[in-house]
Structure formats: structure tokens, C-alpha cells
Image (tube, grey):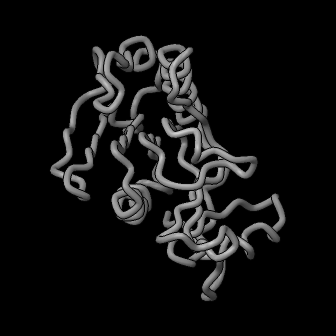
């Protein structure tokens, strides 16, 4: 199931702020994409556990973790908020520069973005959002595949994501941009439901 476009118009953050809260959208280069319906319990468990571990590890540190929904505005230059045409809501994110935080959420690239994949969002997260995060300068991008129990990590080098590291959700995975911070998988993986046949 692919995500649906709201319409064929080009939108900005000013438009986005006028839409009702009942249906959530992300803007990518002016295109409004309807976000998937309420995520599964497994999705929420994975996102919540990653957020919890990051929050515990980063206590008393300058970097701050957040969990969706948080608007992340990604300007292409120095345009005013109302003219920004890319606004996303990553499942989990870490921001190390407090100047990027304001009452509306985050303006500028988070340092770490984690997207937990579901069948309805996998291609969107792998393709469209990966390009957006790369262009914006996200330093590390994780795609967590709960049903496959796999992790794909992209790291930014010279303005581009290199070849991804792919591994299983076992043991621990260090967060490359956060020295000493690791995500532990075994307990979480043990409680995930078995993959669909």
C-alpha cells in the first residue's frame, strides 16, 4: 500500500498549519503525503524502546531525543518558516544543536533520524525520505525493519549517504554520531511478534 498524495498542488508550511489535525501529512518538496494510519503495536514498541534507550543514555547531555509526532522543518536555504516546503515527522530523532529547537518543533536537520518501517511506509522511507534527509544533512539515518528484524544505517560523508550498513536486530548497535551510546536489541526483538508467513 503506497502513501496517498493529498492533491496535486504545491504546498508550504503556511498551508500545512491550516490543515485539520484529524489527518496528518508530511510535506516533501511541496507535495503533501498522507501519513499512514495508526501504527501497529510492534512499530510503537520499537520506536518507544529506541527513544527510551536514547533518552536514558543522553540524560545530562546536550543532545536531546524526541519521538513522533514532532514537526521537523527542513529549509533548503534561509527561507522563512511559512515558505518551507518540506516538513517531516520522523519516528525518533536526536538534535544536538539547541538553536534548532523552537516552540513549533525542529528547524533544520536532526543529527540522528530513526524511521520504523511498516508495509505502507517502507518505500517512502527508503526512497523519498532518505533523499530528503541526505539533502538536509542528517548525519545518521536508521531504518528499522521490525518484521524482518533488520536494521539499515546510512551515514553522511562529504554531503552524501554512503553505502548502508545492514544488520540484524541482535546484540547492540552503536550510534556512530553519539560516542558511547548503543541500542540494545535482544529484549526488544524477543517481544516482537513473529513475521507474517
In the orientation shown, which residue stands out farthest toward the left?
Answer: 163
Q: In x, y percent, where is residue 134?
A: 34, 58
**Residue at (34%, 45%) from the top-left corner?**
139
Which of the 4 quarters of the picture holds residue 173? Answer: top left
The total of numbered circles placed on residues is 0
Q: Against 16, is 134 above or below?
A: above
| Quadrant in which the C terminus appears | top left
Q: In x, y percent, where is residue 153?
A: 28, 41
**Residue at (20%, 46%) from the top-left corner?**
164
Q: In front here: 12 or 190? A: 12
**Residue at (56%, 27%) from the top-left corner?**
45
**In the figure, is residue 141 to the left or right of 1?**
left
Q: Against 75, is 170 above or below?
A: above
**In the figure, is residue 127 to the left or right of 65?**
left
Q: In x, y percent, where is residue 86?
A: 55, 68
In the orientation shown, which residue stands out farthest toward the bottom?
Answer: 9
Q: In front here: 75 or 145? A: 75
Q: In x, y percent, where is residue 23?
A: 75, 61
Q: Against 66, is 72 above or below?
A: below
Q: In front here: 42 or 64? A: 64
**Residue at (41%, 38%) from the top-left corner?**
196
Amino acid at each position: 500500500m503506497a502513501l496517498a498524495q493529498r492533491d496535486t498542488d504545491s504546498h508550504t508550511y503556511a498551508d500545512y498549519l491550516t490543515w485539520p489535525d484529524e489527518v496528518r501529512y508530511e510535506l516533501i518538496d511541496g507535495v503533501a503525503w498522507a501519513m499512514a494510519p495508526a501504527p501497529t503495536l510492534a512499530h510503537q514498541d520499537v520506536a518507544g524502546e529506541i527513544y527510551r534507550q536514547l533518552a536514558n543514555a543522553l540524560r545530562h547531555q546536550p543532545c536531546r531525543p524526541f519521538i513522533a509526532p514532532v514537526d521537523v522543518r527542513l529549509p533548503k536555504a534561509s527561507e522563512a518558516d511559512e515558505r518551507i516546503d518540506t516538513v517531516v515527522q520522523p519516528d525518533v530523532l536526536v538534535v544536538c544543536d539547541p538553536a534548532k529547537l523552537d516552540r513549533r518543533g525542529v528547524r533544520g536537520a536532526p543529527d540522528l533520524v530513526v524511521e520504523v518501517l511498516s508495509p505502507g511506509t517502507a518505500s517512502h522511507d527508503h526512497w523519498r525520505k532518505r533523499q530528503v534527509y541526505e539533502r538536509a544533512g542528517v548525519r545518521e539515518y536508521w531504518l528499522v525493519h521490525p518484521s524482518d528484524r533488520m536494521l539499515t544505517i546510512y551515514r553522511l560523508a562529504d554531503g552524501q549517504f554512503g553505502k548502508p550498513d545492514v544488520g540484524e536486530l541482535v546484540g547492540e548497535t552503536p550510534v556512530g554520531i553519539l560516542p558511547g551510546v548503543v541500542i540494545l536489541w535482544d529484549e526488544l526483538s524477543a517481544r516482537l511478534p513473529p513475521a507474517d508467513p
